[in-house]
Image: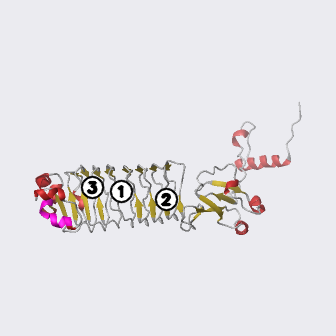
Amino acid sequence: MATRTIDDTKLQNIAVAIQAKDNGGQMTVDEMPGRIAPLPAAPVESPALILWDWEGTKLAEFDKTAALALTALPAPGSFPYYAYADHDLLLFQEWNWSIANIKTWIQNHEGETHDVGAIYTTTDGQNHNFWGNPRLDTAAAISIQKRGTSSIGYTEFNNYNSLRFVNIPNGVTSIGNYAFNNCAAVKWVNIPQGVRSIGNSVFTNCYSLEKACIPNSVTSIGTSAFRNCHTLEITGIPDGVTGIGESTFNGCASIKKFTIPSSVTSIGASAFQLCYSMARVNIPGNVTSIGAAAFGNCKALCDVLIEAKPALANVNAFDGLPTNYRLYVPRANLSWFQAATNWSTLYSQHIVAIEDNLVYLESIGFNVDAYKGAA
C-alpha cells in the first residue's frame, strides 16, 4: 500500500480546527468528522479599480497590483467582450480620472474600490458631456440618445441625478416603468412621434422637468407618470389617451390650465392633487368616473367645466379648492348632479349651469360654442 504523507502546514491547520471546535477536549475517531471546525475561507480581495461605461456597464476591473502597473487607461471600444451598441451618437473623450490620480487614490485607500467612468460628447449639436461615473454626482449637462431599440427599459436611467436633457430617438415605441424616476435635474424631455405608451412613474420626482413633448401617438400614460414634476408646464395630453391614472400629475405645481381630451373616460384618484397653480380644467363628456382627491388641494382651481355625468368616488375630489370655486355643467344635467351620490353634497354651493355663464367661460378660454344656442 502506498504511503500517504501530509505536510506540516496542513497538520497545523487540522490541529487549529480541532482546538477551535472543542477547546482542547477529547473526541473519538468516529466523532471527529462532524466535530472539526471548518477552516476559514481565504478572504476575497476587492478590485482596486473598476471601469464603467456611460450607461453603467462594467467594462473591466483590476486588482491593486494590476491597477498600479497600468500606464494608460484603454478606450471603451478596445474591450473585446463589450458590445459597442448604443454609442453611434456618442464620441468617447476620456475617463473622468487621470491615470496618475487613480494610482494616488488606490495607494491612499487600501482595500477600497475606485470607480472610474467614461466621458462622451454627443453628436446632436448640444456639445454636452456624459460622465459615466456610477456614483452619478459629477456630471455636467448631458444629452442621451439611443438608437436601434424600440423601448426605453424598466428603471434604465432611474436615479441618474445629473441627467438634464433627454432626447429619445425615433423608433422607440414605449418607455418602461420608472425609466427616468428620480432624475431630479432633468429639465426637458423630447418624446418623438411613434411612442405609444409611457409607463408608471416614468418621470416621478423629476423636480426640475420644465417641458415634456408628448406626441399624438401616445395612447397610454401610466400611474404617477409625472408625479412631483414641480416645474412642468403642460396644458394637456393627446387625444387618444383613454385614462388619466392615479397620481399621474400629482404635485405638478406649475400647471396653470389643463385640457382633458374627449377620449378620456376616467380620472384616477389624486390625478391632479397638489397642482397648486392650475386655475381651470375641462372634464369632457366621455368621462365616467372621477377618483378620490382627484383635484384635491388645487388651491388656485376656481373653474371646472364638466360636460359629463361621471360617478364621483368621494366628495373630497375637490377638497382644498378656493371657497368660491365653480363646477359648470350643462343646464340639462343640473337635476342629475343635484341627486347623484356625492355630487349632491356640492350642488347648492358650487354647481352652476354652463349656459348661464357663457361670457365669463369664454373670456377665460373655455370653448362653449356648443352651448350658445341653448342659452
Marked residue nearer the N-terminal end (2 or 1): 2
Name which quarter of the figure residue 348 lies in. bottom left
Marked residue nearer the N-terminal end (2 or 3): 2
Q: Where is residue 118 in the image (x, y as percent from the top left)?
A: 63, 61
Name which quarter of the figure residue 370 lies in. bottom left
Marked residue nearer the N-terminal end (3 or 1): 1
Marks 2 and 1 in Cβ contact (< 8 Å)? no
Q: Residue at point 45% right, 49% down? A: 174
| Magenta segment boundaries in residue numbering | 353-362
Q: Which of 38 and 42 is in front in this view?
A: 42
Q: Where is residue 266 in the image (x, y as percent from the top left)?
A: 28, 50
Pointer 2 local density, CA inside 10 Å: few below 14, some 14–19, many at least 20? some
Residue 301 on the magenta segment: no
**How far is the residue under mark 2 from the one under mark 1?**
22 Å
Disc 1 residue type?
Thr
Disc 2 residue type?
Asn
Pointer 3 local density, CA inside 10 Å: few below 14, some 14–19, many at least 20? many
Q: Residue 167 carries which label?
A: 2
**How far is the residue under mark 2 from the one under mark 3?**
35 Å
Report whether 140 appears left or right of 108.
Answer: left
Q: Where is residue 283 in the image (x, y as percent from the top left)?
A: 24, 56
Report whether 151 appears left or right of 86.
Answer: left
Q: Residue 248 carries which label?
A: 1
